[in-house]
Image (cartoon, grey):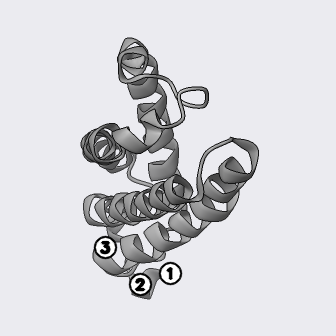
Amino acid sequence: MNYTRVALAAVVAWVVDSVYGFLVFGMALSSEFARYPSVFRSFDAVNALLPLLFGASLIGMIALSYIYAKGYEGGPGLQEGLRFGIVFGIFELFAISIPNYVVYNYGRKLAVETAVAAFVEAVIIGILLGLMYKPAHGRTAAAV
C-alpha cells in the first residue's frame, strides 16, 4: 500500500468534499434546512462548530482513502474509483440517509434532496480517490 498516496488522496477528497458540502448542503439546501429549526442547527451555530466538522471529515477521508486502497483491484483509477463511489453511495443511502429520515423529524422533500446530494458526493469522492491513489510497487490488474 502506498501510504503517501493514501494521505494525498484523502486530503484532495477532503478539500473537494468540503467545497461540495458548503455549496450543496450549506448554500443550495440551506432554505430547506431552515424549515426545520428544531431539527437542524442554524447557519451561525454550524459556523461555530466548523473546526469540529473539518477535523472529523478529514479523519473520515483518511479512513475512506485507506479502505479504497485496501480494496484496490488494480484496474484503471477512474473505473475503480467510480465503482467504489457507487458502492460507498449505496452504503450512505441505506445506512445513513434513509435511517436519518426515519429518526429525524424532517420532510420527505429534504430527505430526498439530501440523499441524492450525498450519493453524488460519494461518487465524486470515489472518483477522486480512484484518480489520486496509485499503488506501491506498480500493482496492476495482472498482478492481482
Relative placement, left or right, of 85 versus 27 is right
Q: Earlier in the sequence, mark 1 or mark 3?
A: 3
Q: Quote the CA–CA distance across marks 1 and 2.
A: 5 Å
Relative placement, left or right, of 59 versus 105 is left
- Badge number at residue 144: 1
CB-based contact (under 8 Å), mark 1 and mark 3: no
The quadrant in which the N terminus is found is bottom left
Q: Which residue position is annotated with label 2?
A: 141
- Residue 70 is situated, as x and y percent measured from the top left of the image, at 54, 60
- The vertical placement of 62 against 115, above or below, is above
| 38 or 104: nearer the viewer | 38
Say which quarter of the image contains residue 58: top left
Q: Which residue position is annotated with label 3?
A: 77
CB-based contact (under 8 Å), mark 1 and mark 2: yes
| 126 or 28: nearer the viewer | 28
Are there few (<14), some (14-19), or many (20+) residues within 10 Å of tag 2?
A: few
Are there few (<14), some (14-19), or many (20+) residues within 10 Å of tag 1?
A: few
Question: Looking at numbered disc 1 in the image, what kind of residue is underneath it?
Answer: Val
Q: Earlier in the sequence, mark 3 or mark 2?
A: 3
- The vertical placement of 141 against 92, above or below, is below
Element marked by disc 3: helix
Are there few (<14), some (14-19), or many (20+) residues within 10 Å of tag 3?
A: many
- Residue 61 is situated, as x and y percent measured from the top left of the image, at 44, 43
- Badge number at residue 121: none
| Residue at image location 53% in from the left, 27% down from the top | 37
Element marked by disc 1: loop
Question: Looking at numbered disc 2 in the image, what kind of residue is underneath it?
Answer: Ala
| Residue at image location 36% in from the left, 23% down from the top | 43
Element marked by disc 2: helix
